[in-house]
Amino acid sequence: MYSMARLHLPRLIRVRVVGQSMAPALNEGDWLLFRAWKSRGGNSNLKSLENLIGRIVLVQRSPNDFMQIKRAVKIDSVGQVWVEGDNDAASTDSRQWGAIEPAEVKAVLLFRYRKSKR
């Protein structure tokens, strides 16, 4: 006799890059796969936020806004996330908005599965 565990797969989000805010790392037409991310409460929240630093994330600033691809750069002293596009000249990010709430980070990049044909 054996026991079965229920497998919970993370929610995956498929995204096509539009624009040049993440060039040269990502280019228009690249296809990416993100894993949904949710900030945790309590003491584990800071550790989960620190794990974002340097990673490419999917950000949505309000429910009516479109999703944006950015890189998590740092966590400030009050636990907010500073995000930037890799291409300064073509990116709107924390340099204009300031740091964002952890809840505005919706997903973390797993991998690029198709490069653009550039």
Image (tube, grey):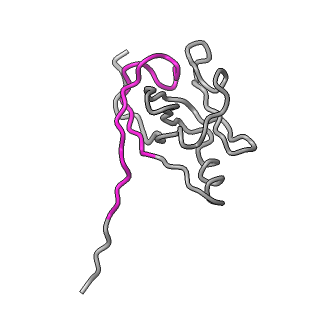
Is residue 95 placed above or below 58 in the rendered structure? above
Instruction: Confirm whether the magenta stretch covers residue 30.
Output: yes
Residue that appears at 43% across and 28% down: 64
State the residue in front, 111 or 13: 13
State the residue in front, 27 or 7: 7
Say left or right for 69 vs 43: left
The quarter of the displayed image where residue 35 is located: top left
Q: Which quarter of the image is occupied by the C terminus? A: top left
Say left or right for 49 vs 67: right
Residue 98, x across and y down, in percent: 67, 28
Residue 75, x across and y down, in percent: 68, 41
Q: Which quarter of the image is occupied by the N terminus? A: bottom left
Say left or right for 77 vs 61: right
Q: Return the residue found at the far left.
A: 1
Residue 95, x across and y down, in percent: 67, 23
Residue that appears at 34% across and 18% down: 117
Picture mark count: 0
Is residue 85 placed above or below 63 in the rendered structure? above
Residue that appears at 36% across and 44% down: 12
The dominant secondary structure in magenta is: loop
Magenta stretch bounds: 7-36
Q: Return the residue found at the far top.
A: 89
State the residue in front, 81 or 117: 81
Instruction: Confirm whether the magenta stretch covers residue 97.
Output: no
Residue 76, x across and y down, in percent: 72, 40
The quarter of the displayed image where residue 111 is located: top left
Residue that appears at 64% across and 38% down: 81
Q: Return the residue found at the far bottom.
A: 1
